[in-house]
Amino acid sequence: MATTTAAPRTLTNTQDRALIAGKRRARFNEALLGLLFVSPVAIIAIVFQIFPILYGFYLSMQGGIIIPEGFVGLRNYTRAVGSIAYMLMFALAFIFAVGGYSFYRKGMNDQREGKGSFTAYLPAGFLGGISSLCLFLVIFFSGAALALIPAGGVVIAFVWFTWLNNKRGQSQGSTPFSASALGVGVFIPAAVLLTLFTFGELNGAMEMLLQVLTALIQDVRYKYIFPQMSQILAFVGAAVCVVGAVAVHEIRRRVDAEMNPGRAGLLGLSRWLFGGIALMLLAYIVGAQEALRTSILAMGDVTNNTVRSTSQALIGQRISLEGLLNGLLAWNEVFSMLIGIGAIGLAWYIWGLTRRTESVLSLISAVLMSILLMVGGLLFLGVLPEAGSSGDPEFFKSMLRTFSYALLTVPVQLGIGLMLAYLLYYEVKWGKGFYRIVFFMPYIAPVVVTAAVFSAIFSLRPAAPANQLVQALGFPPQEWLRNPKGIFQILAEIIGGSGVRLPDFLVGPSLPLFSAIIYSIWVFSGYNAVIFMAGFGNVPKEMYEAAQVDGAGRWSTFRKIIFPLISPTTFFLTVLAIIGTLRSFSHIWVLRTDAARGAMDTTTVYVYTILIETSAIKTRPYAAAMSFLLFGVILVMTIVQNRYSKDRVFYG
């Protein structure tokens, strides 16, 4: 029988290795060249976008009236929003944790699909993430002199990622896991660090105030006052036990009780053991808080002068009796809010289990437990107003005015802009260019000039255009930029007499703020109309004509065809309008008068008044803290709007 031999190899092993090495070098050079091309954009983004945000956060944690004079932690935030500041930090840590888990899950899913080894990238990701966080902390809090060590860690992580992408990802023909691993390395340590920092700030503030309370009631010090750190550790332990109980329950569900009865029984016992320990730890915290309340009641008729002298002798600063009580109850408020949120989350988890249960008794018990936990969570969250009561009332009022201003401005200006755009695009046959210029002029005109013109329109003179209009409608002339009353309260007094008083939530925006709303609608309606007309140009004429041929009316055609097809334009203008109204400043400042200082000041105006009228209480770092809070609100609203509109915007 004839034998066949394999065909000789064209290349030797040495040549194969040289060819592979050459391809790797070519890929590395291409990657390096790409990084060099995008590096200017990255540097600009870091210097002009990321750095100002980080520096604003750093400045908000400084003391001093005009310039930063030392780290004070969350003092400026608690001064603005009370104990809610701690909850905001916990919420930020939770967002970081969820983001890190999302990156981890994405990487592990890609690894299970055979796209490479994600776990090989995790050490480099944690090195890069922790080094970046340390670099930020060192630069802002210790100066640039000590930044070489974390900067070296960042460089090592970059080289490590480059080597892994070249060695593992590209050689296996898979997508590199650098972004996912770096996301895990940044977000998870940031969540842990922010949580520890928040608990540390809460413990430091409470321990300082407990010194004052202990000195005031020496006879009950050892009986009623519990250490703050032990309560925080107990809460962390309870949270770990709850997570452990949930994890054990999920593992037990995957165990066949008939095949492995011993393992299933051990897991079930562990689940109840975790739950019991969590309840005991929470009971300890509740008992400690009740003891603190008893200690506060034991103060009796302690005067403000006694508190001030005691606090001055102990910690070198003056604390009022009200400030002492609010500070001592901070942990109670934070604990209640955390328990409420945790109860709602646990209720949501148990409610999800009811979909997989088969026993009627288990179903009923799970539903009842979910209802009880939900009610308990809502009751605990009822402490939210008390938590904010120790904050700056003027800041809360300015935020309320800001949201009122946005709520009454955005829908109206978008609606008017959409109506004008429809009429111009589909109804007007000639002069469209002229109308576009006319509608766009208020937007491009100088804000100071147009606002000054509006201040004359809304002047106090009976012959002012605004007063002439309201007199033509049968109403008396108004003090548009001076009267701090709400517009609905003014209408109620005109209709029912000066003795009519509406509830606070029905009085509406103040008359000066309503004047600013009219100005904003006048400016941005024309701009929205021009942008909407560009969106109408992307609607296929064939679809519009086909709908008319089929007998559809104008309203049906607009609602079923035109409006869904211009949803990207609507979404874009809505995002810009919300962000713009929340950040409005220039025209409000020009229209603002001394008589309307409290009735017209939105958050940006209130922050600016602090910057130009600094005092020992309201400082520039305090203004930075409020600015950062407003930035957080805008960011959250933008993210929520993006997620909500994700499946509702038609991009073709």
Image (cartoon, rainbow, N blue to C red):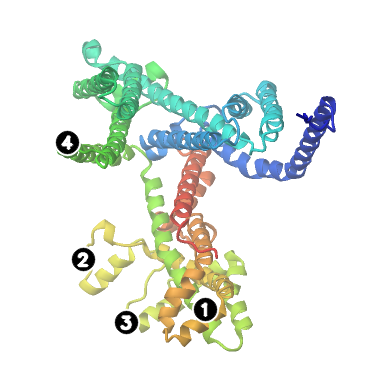
Q: Specify the quadrant of the image occupied by residue 87.
A: top left
Cα separation between marks 2 and 1: 55 Å
Image: 60 above or below 268: below
Cα separation between marks 3 and 4: 64 Å
Front label number (2 vs 4): 4
Q: Say the numbered circle drawn on residue 474.
A: 3
**First in sequence: mark 3 vs mark 1:** 3
The foreground one among 210 and 430 is 430
Q: Say the numbered circle drawn on residue 543.
A: 1
Q: Say the numbered circle drawn on residue 365.
A: 4
The foreground one among 380 and 16 is 16
Q: Specify the quadrant of the image occupied by residue 135.
A: top right
Q: Say the numbered circle drawn on residue 500.
A: 2
Left/right of residue 435 with respect to residue 163 in the rendered view: left
Q: Secondary structure at mark 1?
A: helix
**In the rendering, at what x and y percent does residue 477 appear?**
36, 75
Front label number (3 vs 4): 4
Q: Which amino acid, mark 1? A: Met
Q: Specify the quadrant of the image occupied by residue 460.
A: bottom left
Front label number (3 vs 1): 1
Q: Which amino acid, mark 3? A: Gly
Q: Which amino acid, mark 2? A: Val
Q: Secondary structure at mark 2?
A: loop
**In the rendering, at what x and y percent does residue 147 appear?**
67, 24
